[in-house]
Amino acid sequence: MRAIYILSILLIITLNGCATVEIAKEVTKAGDSIKTTIQKAAKNQSDLEKTEDVIKTEDVIKEKEEIVVAKKKEKAVVNKQKEIAAINIQGRTLNQLTQHFGKYDFIREDGNTKTVRFNTSSCRLFVYFNLEVGKPKAEYYEIRNTKGELIDRKEKINKCFKEIQKT
């Protein structure tokens, strides 16, 4: 039975020999068409990736510019805080600051920097010490609200210093 089935298939193929050649030509054309489509798609993908890289680079440049602007604003606010400050914090030791403000609420050492925080109900005073020197002294400080934002208004800065001195 199997032999008859195979023989009938071979007869059909032999009788349709011309059709087989035509089918082979069409299959070749279809293969070439698919190959061309895949090449175009790969080129479009490559172009798309290049465009995405350019967009990502532009985004990075914009973010860097935003960071620079934000840092300049923060520096201006911190300088304003220093002008308004009731006492000179920079150059003081931790013992001097605790005598003036009372016990700190938080202290952390991170590498060569020690961060000390004095809390009140409305603000936080962050003081930074350089641990690489013999006797660490306050080198930088910031006054922030409870949400972590720099305080830039004179009234709020003065209020914060008054609250810190009470504790």
Image (cartoon, rainbow, N blue to C red):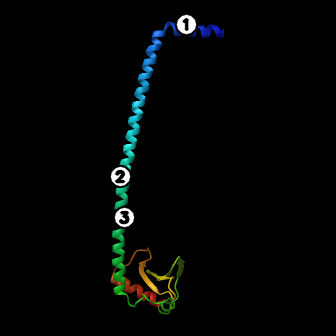
Where is residue 15 shown, x and y percent of the image?
50, 6
When the figure is inspected, residue 31 is found, relative to residue 12, above or below; the finding is below
SS under mark 1 = helix
Q: Quadrant of the N terminus?
A: top right
Q: Which comes before the other along the chain, label 3 or label 1?
A: 1
Mark 1 is surrounded, within 10 Å at the Cα level, by few (under 14), some (14 to 19) or many (20 or more) other residues, namely few
Residue 153: name its quadrant.
bottom left
Which residue is label 1 attached to? 11
Residue at x-position 52% and y-position 85%: 104
Q: Tell me: 105 left or right of 88.
A: right
Which kind of residue does numbered mark 2 sit on? Val
What amino acid is found at the position of numbered circle 3 in the picture? Lys
Whether tag 2 and tag 3 are in contact, CB under 8 A, the answer is: no
- Going by the numbered disc 1, the residue's amino acid type is Leu
Q: Quadrant of residue 85?
A: bottom left
Label 3 element class: helix
Rendering quarter of residue 164: bottom left
**Inter-mark Cα distance, 2 to 3:** 15 Å
Give x and y (percent) for residue 2: 65, 11
For the point 33% across and 82% down, the residue is: 80
Q: Earlier in the sequence, mark 1 or mark 2?
A: 1
The residue identified by callout 2 is 54
